[in-house]
Amino acid sequence: MSDPGRDTSSTRALSRGLRIRVAAFLALALLPIGVMGVLQTRDLSREVDNRSELALLALTNTAAVSERQVFERAFGAAEALTAVLQLMLVEPERCGNYLAQYIKQTGSYSFVGFLDPDGNMVCSSGGTDFDINNWSNLTQRFESPRMWIDPTRDDSADSNGAIDVLYPSYQDETFRGYIAMSLPRIGLGVPWQPSTTRRPLSLTTYNDRGDVLTTVSSTADQTIYLPQDFKFERLDGDWTQTFVAKNQFDQEQAFAVVPVMPGLVYALAAWPVEYRKPAIGRFSSAPMLFPFLMFVASLAVAYYAVDRLVVRHVKNLRNKVQAFSRTRRLPTTSDQFSLSAELQDLEDALAEMAFHLLDDEAQMEDALREKNVLLKEVHHRVRNNLQLISSIMNMQIRKATEPETRDILRRLQERVMSLSSVHKSIYQTENLSRTNAGTLLPDLFERLVAAEGPQGLEYRHDFDEVELFPDQAVPLTLLASELGTNALTFMGAPEGEKPHLFVSLKQLDAGSARLVCENSVGADINDMKPNEAGLGAQLIRAFATQLNGKVETTSTDRLYRTEVTFDVEDVFHEPADH
């Protein structure tokens, strides 16, 4: 006969063992779901964190774009000045005048000069006696020639401070010295204006040695926020990163570091801490239906295989392409053992394509920069040669004994000077393919009035800014010179009145312009009327024909008026290479 107590204990033990087996089976069955849930939650957390970090870095890059543009323009200007200064160093006074004029025209720099390898200022906008003792550690700069950016070491009370830029100059791969420039701080670190773009609480830029270059704040009290006990050296070469730390006021904030100019200038931005601490807890508690989880568990192996073997690598390739399009940096190579042969070939092709594209872009930029510098030098030399010819003609004018000979030579000299003014206008502009006739013609007529204008002349003018290609600017200038010379030659006025001259260049609708030259005439105009078949009239018609213009003249007892209407070309026709 069985013992009821023992049967009860056996039943309880069996029930307990069955529960353990069922729990173990369920745990084993649900283990893939749990593992997948944990992995997906972890990946989601990392993805959100990475996206938050990338967004913060992108916002910091956007906030530092004005500082980046200032420094890039400074180095671009220094590179453009290198070839010009090496040609002008033989004449320090002329070189200094050129740099002083360059500073006046650009308005972006407080000083530009050239330091030879011995540290002597051989040419500068402030003269050769310009004091450079405030510049940082020049001895080290000459021992290791490269690009440098430093704050000026100036403790004077009346100094606004500046940022010093050194750009190495080479000739035949030999170091010849530095192009030295100073950027006034008054134009940097300006408080941000209100906008829809998110701005950091403050932004501080440093050079590669940790010296502060600029600071700017978006707060009302213009506070600059820094991490507690912040040392630039602690970044340890990681120039692109974000982190959360307490600022000098013991407040927790998010900070981001980005390169403004890699290897030279870096930016540290302070942001509200919420920008770096996204709330992701809500994703981990999302309800999930059991049948859906079981279905996902059955697809786990297939999902894992496809993701690990194909999808993950395709995404990496896509991310590399996107990163290259944004940063123009060569993509990093992946682990070859984790890629199939086809994907490895695709990644190698991407790296090779990126390398060739960067090389082609660099060669195109260098060629364009060199072309602009050489074209400016060509125009400058042509102008100098024309001025030399004008000087020789001036000497011949002084030696001529016949008035008619002097008049002919003077007219020729004026035509040469008109050509010279065109070349001067071209090489002084940033865009070599266009010149502004609104600034070119005033100088021409002021020179004519000063040389040939009668006593008491009333001179008026009205010039619009009309952009022309060189093949139109040259005939227009020569045409204006002929009109002005003729007007001053045959000018007169009724008795008791003053002679007057009016010149205008107006931009009309539909891409056309009109040049007007009007002068007063006197009672003896019939005796002084020019010969229509003369050289001056022929030249006026010839230059108008080159402009495809229409000439209209109006003559009364009191004035003589010439109008030339022509089309302003909007396409530059390059000359044929034959």
Image (cartoon, rainbow, N blue to C red):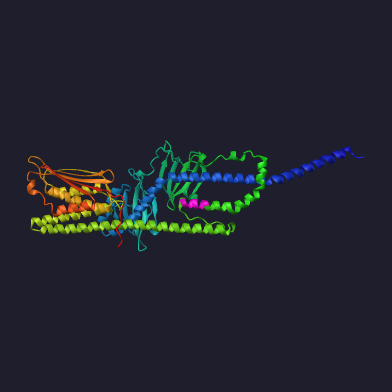
Q: Nearer the viewer, residue 465 or 134?
A: 465
Is residue 81 found inside the magenta-colored segment of the image?
no
The reply to whether residue 37 is in sight is yes
Quadrant location, the C terminus: bottom left
Count of numbered labels shown in the rendering: 0
Image position of 408 (left or right of 298) = left
Residue drawn at (54%, 59%) of the image = 345
Give the main secondary structure of the magenta stretch.
helix
- Residue 22 image offset from top left, x and y in percent: 75, 43
Query: In the rendering, at what x and y percent does residue 481 appear?
Result: 18, 51
Residue extending farthest top: 220
> Which portion, as a residue range, is magenta?
318-325
Residue farthest along the bottom direction in this orientation: 172
Left or right of 168? Residue 93 is: left
Is residue 228 visible in the rendered image? The answer is no
Q: Position of residue 103 (x, y in %)?
A: 30, 49
Q: Is residue 320 magenta?
A: yes
Horizontal and vertical percent for residue 112?
31, 52
Name the residue nearer the viewer: 256 or 161: 256
